[in-house]
Amino acid sequence: MIKMKLTPSLLPCLRRMLFRRRCDNVQNTQLIMIEGIPGSGKSTTAQLIANELRRMGVNHKWWYEEEKGHPVYFYEDYTEIQAIIDDLTNGNYPKVIDNALKKWRQFADSVLSSGDVVIVDSCLFGYLTWTLFPFEVPAQEIEAYVRAVEQIIKPLNPHVIYYYQADIGAALAKICTRRAGETEQNFIRAAAESPYGKSRGLSGFEGLVAYWKGYREITDRAYQRLACTKISIDNTEGNWPQYARLISDFLGFDHSDQAPLGEQDDVKHFVGTYQSKTEGIPDCSIRIESGQLIADGLPQVWKKSTLIPNSSGVYDVQSLPFQVSFVVVDEGIRMHLTGPALLDGPVDYRFVKLG
C-alpha cells in the first residue's frame, strides 16, 4: 500500500477529487455565471441553483451582485467606487481594466484551490462592463476585456447562462413595476446622465430602452464569441418552470433522489403586521398569496417578496441572499431578517408581531 503524506500543497487536489465524487450528476464546473439586463431573473436563478446544490450536498457559495466583500470587485465601498468613476471620467479606463483583471486572477486562484462551486450574477458582462459601457469605452475594448476574463477563469470550466428578451422595453417596464418605488426614475436618471446617454441626448423611458439596446448589442456579440460552456434563454414569456428545466439539464442536475428543501410549517400563525425593534424602521406585513408567504415592507427587500421554505420556521427571501426566521415565544411571534452585508449596509433586523 502506498502511503501519501498530507501536505498543504495536496489539499487543493484532494478538495477537487472530493468535489468530482460529490458531483457525479453535475457538470464538472466550479463557476456558474448568470448574465442579462436588470430584472431578467439573474439573482432568482442564482438562488435556485444554490438551493439545488445545497440539496445535493455540494459545497458552494452564491455571491450576490451587491454583496459587500464580493471577491471579483476591486472596491469595498462607495468612496472607492467614486475613485473608479473618476478614472473613467478622465479616460483612464486601461487602469480600471488592469485592476479588474488582477482581481479576476486572484478570484480564479482562490476558487480553484477551494474545490467549491461558486455562483455569480452580473459579473462577466455585468459589473465592469456596465461601468465601461456608460463611459463610452470603445466596444472592442470591452469585448477584449471579456475575452481576457474568459481566459483567466478557463481552469474553472465556467458555465454561462445568458438571459435575453425580444422586447427590451417590455422587460424594463415589467421590472420597474415589480420593484416599484423610484426604480424607473433611478434607471432613467442613470442612463440619461451617463456620458453615453448625454452624448446621444437620451431621456425618459425611451432613452432608457435605447441605452439598454446599445448595451445588448455588445453583450450579444460577446456571448456569441464565448468558447466556454454556455446557454442563452429568451425569457420574454416568463415561463420559469420551463427555464428551470433547461438550466437543470444544462448543469446536469439529477432530481431523482432529492428530498424536499425544507419542512412544512403551519404558516397561518405567521401572518400579520410586524413592528421593528429599531427606531425609524416602518412596520411590515406577512400574508399568504396562492399558498405562499409574502413579505411586504421589509427593509432592503423589494415589495411583495415571496418567502421560500428553507427549514422549519426559516425562509429564504426570493432573489436575495436573505433569510427570514420566525420564532414562537410565550409573548407572541418574533421575526428576524438576516443576510450578508451589502454595499448599502448590514442586514440584521428584528420584529415582533402585533396583536
Image (spheres, grey):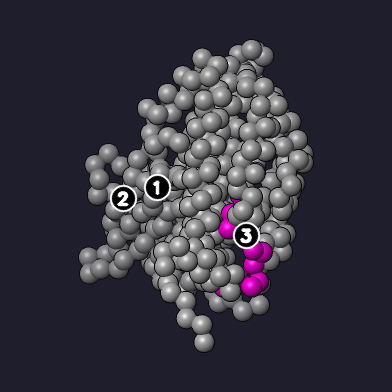
Dot 2 falls on a residue whose secondary structure is: strand
Question: Residue tagged by mark 1?
Answer: 298
Question: Residue tagged by mark 2?
Answer: 349
Q: Say if 257 sits above or below 240 in the image.
A: below
Instruction: Give the CA separation, mark 1 to mark 2.
Output: 9 Å
**Percent x, y of residue 257:** 61, 79
Q: Residue furthest front?
A: 2
Q: Say if 24 sits above or below 335 in the image.
A: below
Residue 118 visible, this orientation: yes
- Give the number of the disc on residue 29: 3
Mark 1 or 2, which is nearer the eye? 2
Q: Quadrant of the C terminus?
A: bottom left
Dot 3 falls on a residue whose secondary structure is: loop
Foreground of the two, 138 or 127: 138
Which SS does the magenta portion mostly show? Answer: loop
Contact between marks 1 and 2 (CB within 8 A): the answer is yes
Instruction: Give the CA separation, mark 3 to mark 2.
Output: 36 Å
Q: Amino acid at mark 3?
A: Thr
Res. 20 image quadrant: bottom right
- The magenta region covers 22-33
Instruction: Give the CA separation, mark 3 to mark 1.
Output: 35 Å
Q: Amino acid at mark 1?
A: Leu
